[in-house]
Amino acid sequence: MAGVISADRIAALIEDAPAWAKIGLTVPNERLRADAHQELARYVYTALYQPIQTDTAQLPLPL
């Protein structure tokens, strides 16, 4: 499922996001809400667009 961007994937990432950011979306303080928005967006963006982890010690197989 990694690499596929879908509503289900984004929902799963939001569920896995830091709890403080999700709770922070509901606080009455505007600055804290803005910080929570940024953290949640950063978390989802990073998870969706992180580089694929490759093992440089593994030999590539010809196709």
Image: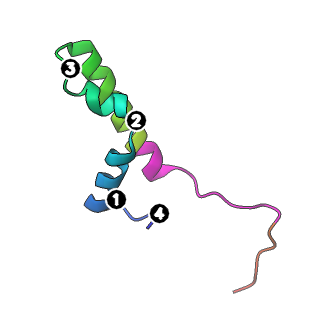
Residue 48 in the figure: left or right of residue 52: left
Q: Earlier in the sequence, mark 3 or mark 4?
A: 4
Quarter placement of the C terminus: bottom right
Q: Which residue is mark 3?
A: 27
Q: Report whether 51 appears left or right of 41.
A: right
Residue at x 52%, y 50% (from the top left corner) = 50
**Magenta segment boundaries in residue numbering:** 45-57
**Secondary element type, mark 2:** loop
List the residue tagged with mark 2: 18
Task: Name the disc covering residue 63, or none.
Answer: none
- Residue 29 occupies quadrant: top left
Compare marks 4 and 2 and give the one earlier in the sequence. 4
**Sequence-earlier tag: 4 or 1:** 4
Q: Main secondary structure of the magenta part?
A: loop
Spatial CA span between label 1 and label 3:
26 Å
Query: Where is mark 1, residue-wise?
Result: 9
Q: Which residue shows up at 20% across the image and 14% down it?
A: 30
Q: Amino acid at mark 1?
A: Arg
Which badge, 2 or 3, comes first in the chain's sequence? 2
Q: Which residue is mark 4?
A: 2
Tell me, yes or no, whether the highlighted magenta stretch contains residue 3: no
Mark 1 or mark 3: whose residue is earlier in sequence: 1
Percent position of residue 14, x then y = 32, 45
Q: Does the CB distance between marks 2 and 1 fall below 8 Å?
A: no
